Amino acid sequence: MIALNIHFHASPRWPEQNYLLYIGMRLPYKVKRVETVVKSSDVQVREFTLAAGEVIPWHYHPGKHGHYFVLEGILSISSREPDVMARNLPVGSSHKIAPGTPHLITNGFDANCRFLLVQGVGAYDWNAAD
């Protein structure tokens, strides 16, 4: 999978902003940077950088675990179902999200947040959660 950060013009559905493009699919959230480190049919490893205030909205992955490793700044992860949880993870921390768990990723702090996300085993998917 190739990840590109591309600027799209405004449309009635999506305001003008940067979008992360995955194989022709644009996701309605802005991130400062995503770099694919490893990608296979079963495992994906990416390094994300979120600028201050950036959010990856509520979503879930039905068949994959997500393992987050904080490299810089503070990563905020909220999840729900089965339990409601909110955590601020400092550098050196890690957190695991089980398949099917709706979660929200945010950087509510003044500096960049950089984290490594290891996902597997299974094909990549991203499903919005209300």
Image (cartoon, rainbow, N blue to C red):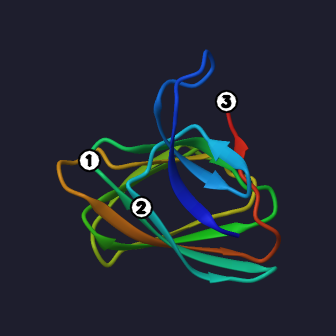
Dot 2 corresponds to which residue? 33
Q: Which amino acid does label 3 sit on?
A: Asp
Dot 3 corresponds to which residue? 130
User: 19 or 112, which lies in front?
Assistant: 19
Between disc 3 and disc 1, the foreground one is 1
Mark-to-mark CA distance, 3 and 1: 23 Å
Mark-to-mark CA distance, 1 and 2: 12 Å
Residue drawn at 34 percent across, 67 percent down:
114
Q: In this view, does 128 lie above or below 70?
A: above
Residue drawn at 58 percent across, 37 percent down:
28
Between disc 1 and disc 2, the foreground one is 2
Between disc 3 and disc 2, the foreground one is 2
Few, some or many residues within 10 Å of mark 1 (<14, 14–19, 20+): some
Q: What residue type is labelled 2?
A: Arg
Q: Is residue 93 left or right of residue 9?
A: left
Quadrant location, the C terminus: top right
Dot 1 corresponds to which residue? 52
